[in-house]
Amino acid sequence: MQHPYESWEHCPHCSKLTNCRIFATEKRKIFYDIDLELNMWIKFVECQGCQEFFLLYSKENPYGQTGYDGELECTTSTVPISRNEDELCKIGHFKISLDDNVNEFANLLYKQIMESIVYKNFIVAAAGMRTLIDTFCIAKTDKDIGITKNIDVLVSKRFITKKQSNVYKKISEIGHGAVHRYHIPKKQSLINGIRAIEDLYNILFSFPEYEKIVSKESVPPDTRKSKKA
């Protein structure tokens, strides 16, 4: 299921059953005993009633009845999260402006990355950063050839330098490791990474517009005569 999607959940903030937005889902394996492995899902949720965030934990119940599809029933619990707008501002505040077909997705993804960093959901943040780099690359090159090859295209077209490309490939590697090898990156790495991605956006999309405006500025020639020694 693609994110975000909506679901009816009990909010721990307003204590009501409300229509909530599920922004991200993380699946983990847990061991109930030495012979039994269960699934647990952690969801990052926003209540549409009180506009507060919480984590929703769903865990397979080994004593629950088996459903028609052979899966165990789940028990759920919630953990409230308090907003920290000051820390969000410290990390960064950015507005992405791309084509209509990717603009809403890119801005929503950026917001989720920032909030995931603040709420210490570092795996989701790292995966989102990799996806955001890929989104920028595809929007600029109009090619969906894989993130590494697309970064190399940006180098070949001289949008970024080889040294800069190594940074974005490293961010991509961190995201890949978080998803496929359960590597939990350090918070400071994610903060610096998202700042580097903001720079990438400015290089690819903002700077060309700045250049157009600045180049139109008419500056009178320097009529001063050079002084003879």
Image: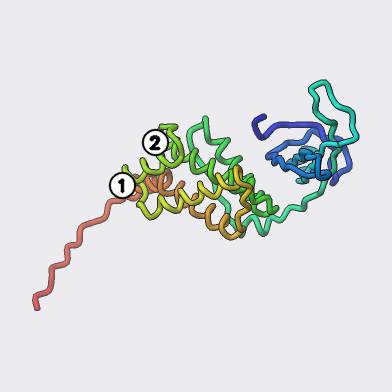
Q: Residue at x 89, y 28 (%)?
A: 65
**Pointer 2 residue:** 141
Q: Nearer the viewer, residue 176 or 153?
A: 176
Amino acid type at circle 2 is: Thr
Can you give x and y, in whole percent of width and height, for residue 134 in the image?
49, 40
Taking 224 as reference, is 12 above or below it? above
Q: Secondary structure at mark 1?
A: loop
Residue under label 1: 216
- What's the amino acid at mark 1? Lys
Image x and y of residue 91, in percent = 60, 57
Estimate the spatial distance between the alpha carbons at disc 1 and disc 2, rounded to whole Å. 26 Å
Query: Mark 1 vs mark 2: which is more N-terminal?
Result: 2
Q: What residue occupies the far left of the structure in this picture? A: 228
Q: Residue at x 44, y 32 (%)?
A: 144
Q: Residues within 10 Å of mark 1 (few under 14, many from 20)?
A: few
Q: Quick one: SS at disc 2?
A: helix
Bin the neighbour count of mark 2 within 10 Å (Cα to Cα): few under 14, some 14-19, many 20 and up: some
Which image quadrant: the N terminus? top right
Residue situated in front as seen by the camera: 25 or 208? 25
Quarter of the rendering occupied by the C terminus: bottom left
Q: What residue occupies the far bottom of the structure in this picture?
A: 229
Kindly identify the residue that appears in the image at 63 percent across and 47 percent down: 182
Query: Is 206 or 53 nearer to us in this picture?
Result: 53
Q: Position of residue 163 (x, y in %)?
A: 38, 55
* 143 sits to left or right of 88: left
User: Is 182 left or right of 164, judged from the image as shown?
Assistant: right
**Does the image show residue 149?**
yes
Q: At which x and y percent is residue 139?
A: 45, 36
Q: Report whether residue 198 is seen.
A: no
The number of numbered badges drawn on the structure is 2
